[in-house]
Image (cartoon, grey):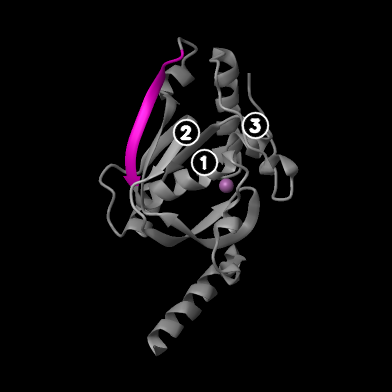
Amino acid sequence: MKIEPREILKMGNPLLRQISEPVDEFNEQEIRDLIELMRVSMVAANGVGLAAPQIGVLKRVVIFEVPAARISEEDGEISANGGVPQTVLINPKVTPLTEEKVLGWEGCLSVPGLRGLVPRYTRIKYEGLTLDNASLAGGGELQIQKISRDVSGFHARVVQHEVDHLDGVLYPERMTDIRQLIFQTELPSFIRALDEQAERK
Ligand code: NI
């Protein structure tokens, strides 16, 4: 059966402001259906991450992937492993591993067309439960595993962004200078102006 993508809720929808509930019982079919629906909805919207509340489901579940190109962009290094494959994270817990934060560009499917410079911890640990891809694709037994990763750069940024959704937080609230909230189409001119400013100094 083909799953139709769910519409992504936009900033202003009250559901995006709610605290989501932990997943405490593993109803296999329910979890499998939710994750498949999230995956289909994220791909249809061309996103790299999605949290369940963005499709109106107030459960602590996120999915994300980190394209290799984004890793090299943000971290200034060539990614040896070709990015982070699609990861499902259930009941995530994020712990900063440093006090250092760095500004980086973020967008969000719930805030379409805009980009903002957001400060995020450069290194974090994230823990939670995950499902391996094979058990998702199969219809076999659901393999639920504990996951614990120490990550940095864009990977750390994406996880902080997605987990914020579970607490009703959208990235503009994390911003420290609202003048850095811009339309994506203006990104090249914005960056050019920043560069020119830097050169004059
Ligand atoms: Ni988002």
Magenta segment includes 144: yes
Type of amino acid under label 1 = Val
Residue 115 x %, y %: 57, 61
> What whole-number distance in Å separates the C-alpha atoms at marks 1 and 2?
7 Å
Q: Which residue is mark 2?
A: 92
Q: Earlier in the sequence, mark 2 or mark 3?
A: 3
Type of amino acid under label 2 = Pro
Residue 25 x %, y %: 55, 15
Q: Earlier in the sequence, mark 1 or mark 3?
A: 3
Q: Quadrant of the N terminus?
A: top right
- Displayed quadrant of residue 65: top left
Query: Contact (CB < 8 A) between labels 1 and 3?
Result: no
Report the residue that reaches farthest toward the bottom: 200
User: Which stretch appears magenta?
Assistant: 142-151
Label 1 secondary element: helix
Query: Does the image show residue 8?
Result: no
> What whole-number distance in Å separates the C-alpha atoms at marks 2 and 3?
14 Å
Residue 95 x %, y %: 40, 42
Callout 1: few (<14), some (14-19), or many (20+) C-alpha neighbours within 10 Å? many
Establish if 69 lies above or below 30.
below
> Which of the labelled discs sits on residue 58, or is there none?
3
Q: Which residue is mark 1?
A: 163
Query: Contact (CB < 8 A) between labels 1 and 2?
Result: yes
> Which of the labelled discs sits on residue 31, or is there none?
none
Query: Does the image show residue 30?
Result: yes
